[in-house]
Amino acid sequence: MDGDPMFSPLTPEEAAKAGSPKKATPSKTPIVPVPADTPVLQFKHPKHGEPGRAWPYHDAAGHLVGYVCRWDFTNAEGQKDKEVLPVTYCDLGNGKRAWRSKGIPSPRPLFDLPGILGRADAPVLICEGEKTRDAASILFPDMVATTPAHGAKSPHLTDFGPCAGRVVVIATDFDEPGRTNDKGKPLHPGQDFADKVCELARAAGAKQVLHLRPDRLGTWIWRDGEKIERDGPLPDGWDLADAIEEGWTEPAVAAVKIDTGFFTPYLDAEARGEAKPEPTPEAAPDGWPFRLAWNGVERRIEKSDKETGVIRVEWRWFCSRLEVIAETRSADGEEWGRLLRLVDRDGRVKQWAMPMSMLAGDGTAYRERLFSLGLVIAPGRAPRDALHEYIATARPDERARCVGRLGWQGKGYVRFNGTVGGQDNG
């Protein structure tokens, strides 16, 4: 076999390569919690340098367990981009320790876990990512805002136990489910994230899981102190951080979230498949400045642009859903009124035959009754005036007869729960 090239001696270059084994990758074992004498966070991305933001994560006792860091930059295509990485204090072996890009060991704590535990009665508002969580804490200070580490990537590695017995609200980004990049990976896996968070929160024993949909704020933007309807669809990826950039403030949010439909029960994938589409607002009769929407009654507001003179139309919510379903009157054509129907906050449908005489004066009496039945009215004089005008000017197609006592009324016998026999509503 001396002439066989397969068994020829190695050249010096080949021998050098063969004798140079690859260096083993140093081990990185996160130290949790981070020791008290640890140096402050010192970590540079090999391409982007120091992080623009670093969010600290703590355990239930308040001890630091690691950070989630974010770098914002412009990519090769000239577009804004970001990179988000976990950074923990690691044991590198041989007595060496340093901050390294390594995930927080599971089960990971929710962001601001001490705050969640310290406000046991506050709803827990769960967002996708730390930047969105920061915006949520500004817009919804009555809730404790949080996020699982690594956002949409791995919520299943986070401990949702602190959600037990709590009202949980999931704030979703405006993402299009199913969209993928050129590598087949989801561009915005927000819906999958929210579904998983819902599953985990329920499994942990959450009392209720609600949904803050992006269109609840994203439908409008604020300009020069005025709330105007967005011209066009929501941008892909829109979140609560964008809401702040578009002028939303805590007082502005407080004015709209009193609407009973602002937060809705979270529907997971199975429930969404069975649910009926959300109804579109019912068209207002010609010339009548009111319409019924899915979440209540809206009044048409027209505003003229100071510079262009163009008339902008905004439909402004002023109360929860209230229908004027019939005009009422007595047998002799007196005691006119309105038959009103509403749905209270427990989902119960209620009707009330309101005498028109209650519209006399400032309307305090009928508003007190509607409040008692469960109607929600926006604060301020303008919503009260809108409600007054809505009830007073409604012209329902149906008419009904009201009586002052039970018993025989013409050809029918009136009972507390209905009428037996002939009825004449004409």
Image: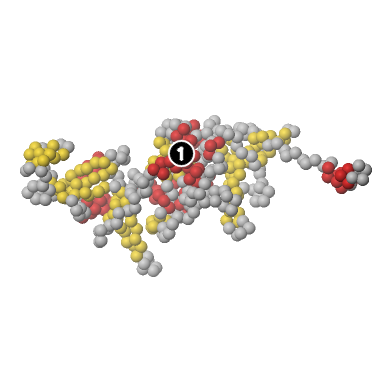
- From the image, which quarter does the N terminus lie in? top right
Which residue is pictured at 13% across the width and 40% down the height? 419
Circle 1 packing at 10 Å, graded few (<14), some (14-19), many (20+), is many
x and y percentages locating residue 224 in the rendered image = 41, 59
Residue under numbered circle 1: 198
Percent x, y of residue 200:
48, 35
Image coordinates for residue 150, horizontal then vertical, percent: 56, 42
Residue 234 as seen in the image, left or right of residue 392:
right
Residue 199, visible in the rendered structure: yes
Colouring of the image: secondary structure
Residue 92: quarter of image: top right
In depth, the one of 407 and 8 nearer the eye is 8
- Of residue 321 and residue 17, the one placed in the foreground of this image is 17
Taking the spot 34% from the left edge, 65% from the top edge, the residue there is 311
Residue in the foreground of this view, choosing between 134 and 299: 299
In the displayed orientation, state which residue is furthest to the right: 2
* Left or right of residue 226, residue 417 in this image: left
Q: In the rendered picture of this protein, how many numbered marks are placed on residues? A: 1
Q: Secondary structure at mark 1?
A: helix
The residue shown at (68%, 37%) is 28
Residue at the extreme bottom: 308
- Amino acid type, mark 1: Cys
Q: In this picture, is 258 found above or below 200? A: below
Can the viewer see residue 335? no
- Residue 64 drawn above or below residue 298: above
For the point 54% across and 51% down, the residue is 180
Residue 359 placed where, x, y %?
18, 50
Residue in front for this viewpoint, 105 or 143:
105
Residue 64 sits in quarter: top right
